[in-house]
Amino acid sequence: MYRNPPLVRAFWPLFYTALFVGAAGCGCEEDPGLDPLEPDPVVDASWNRGFYLDMALDGEGDPWLAYQDRDTTALNIAHGTGDPVEFTHWAVDGHGAAEGGMLVGAFDGGYYASVAVSPEGSVHATHWSRDNDGQLRHAVRQGDSWTTTVVDYGGVGQFTSLGLRNGEPIVAYYNYDDRALKVAWKSEQTWSNETVDAGELTQDGIDDGATLADVGRYADLLVTADGTTYIAYFDHANGNLKVAVGGPGNWTVDTWYGEGTGRAGAWPNLSEAGGAVHVAFQDETASAVLFGQWTGAELAPAAGSTTGLTVAARQFVGPDPATAWVSGSPVIMYHDGVENDALLATMGPEGWTSTIFAADGAVGFHNQMAADDSGNVNWACFNHSTTDISFQRFTP
């Protein structure tokens, strides 16, 4: 809704005061029918932060958030402590100097932020910057200081997903110049990178009108307890969910879902439980949220599921699913694009049940969930109405 600028509103009282003072000598009586002006409505604060949100828990169960500050297009980090949780925010990478209250400099980053915390407490984050034709950047906090590095550059760095492998960062990301999936990793203070999947155009893609291979969007990386790295990602050309398994220099690429079923595989979210790797993702053709476990040969329904892979099916549902495990059972938060709500799906004896978890404003964007050792689920998302971060700690 349009409102008059504050400068204009501030001028009106001065204008009308001068008008009535100038007219005071005429002896005119005050209009008895004049009603007092209603005060201006109070406008909610707009923070313009929380875009491209990601979350990780540290060893104490406290949340760390990485996100873009839209006002400065830079990477910010927030640390939550206490009960209720309160956050401290840091400007980490990309804030230019200010002159006369105006930001100067051309840094344009903070996109596709991802965060990971080591058992020793080191905080790592990656993000994409548009600068110099596109960069993948890394920031690490050790003690009270941050160090930033350009990891890769030249048409790369979108859809970053960060993990820690043998205590060192490893990140999956999209090479949008070559439409391929890449991985970068740090070892002995040196960053290396490689193309994991350059893609291949199949008949599914040709039938869908694609002319070029295109893989690597929505990359989600998971390092399992045994050190194996999984990367789930979307084959945009062919409309399939793909996965790369292994480690630097040794990857096996499979198609997990979508061949011959339409377009499915966007927004994958990996999780590990009971010795198995699970994935939640969107089936665009069926307009559904799907969830399954990888058996080594196929994507199968999760243990206890009575509805196959389908968690929920409704028009415009499924983006940004996030999974947490509580007492061996999965809970999934996802976005309802019709009502702009955050919906929570839980699995019981009768199958999956979805309930509205949050409906105050347009919520449920960039959903992030993680369970702590006390069985509490930490949930964060971007609230599009307030352009700020929404956070709750709850027990399902």
Image: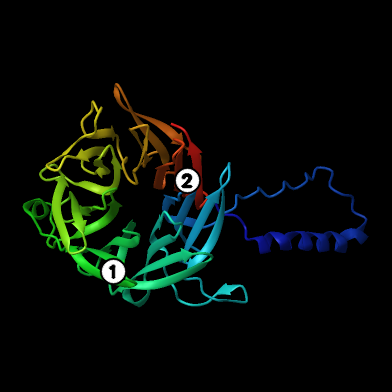
Q: Quadrant of residue 316?
A: top left
SS at mark 1 in the image? strand
The amino acid type of the residue labelled 2 equals: Gly
Vertical relation: 314 (above or below) 56? above
The amino acid type of the residue labelled 1 equals: Val
Q: Position of residue 21 (x, y in %)?
A: 87, 61
Badge 2 density bin: few <14, some 14–19, many ≥20, Cα 10 Å = some
Q: Return the residue at label 1.
A: 156
Rendered image: mark on residue 61:
2
Which residue sits at x=20%, y=31%?
308
Q: Position of residue 351 (x, y in %)?
A: 28, 25
- Give the mark nearer the N terminus: 1 vs 2: 2
Q: With 62 as the anchor, is 16 left or right in this view?
A: right
Q: Along the line of sight, which residue is nearer the eye, 395 or 368?
A: 395
SS at mark 2 in the image? loop
Residue 72 makes an appearance in the image: no
Residue 87 makes an appearance in the image: yes
Q: Position of residue 305 (x, y in %)?
A: 25, 28
Compute the Cα span from label 1 to label 2. 33 Å
Q: With 22 as the anchor, is 314 left or right in this view?
A: left
Q: Position of residue 61 (x, y in %)?
A: 47, 45
Q: Quadrant of the C terminus?
A: top left
Vertical relation: 90 (above or below) 289? below
Q: Quadrant of residue 119?
A: bottom left
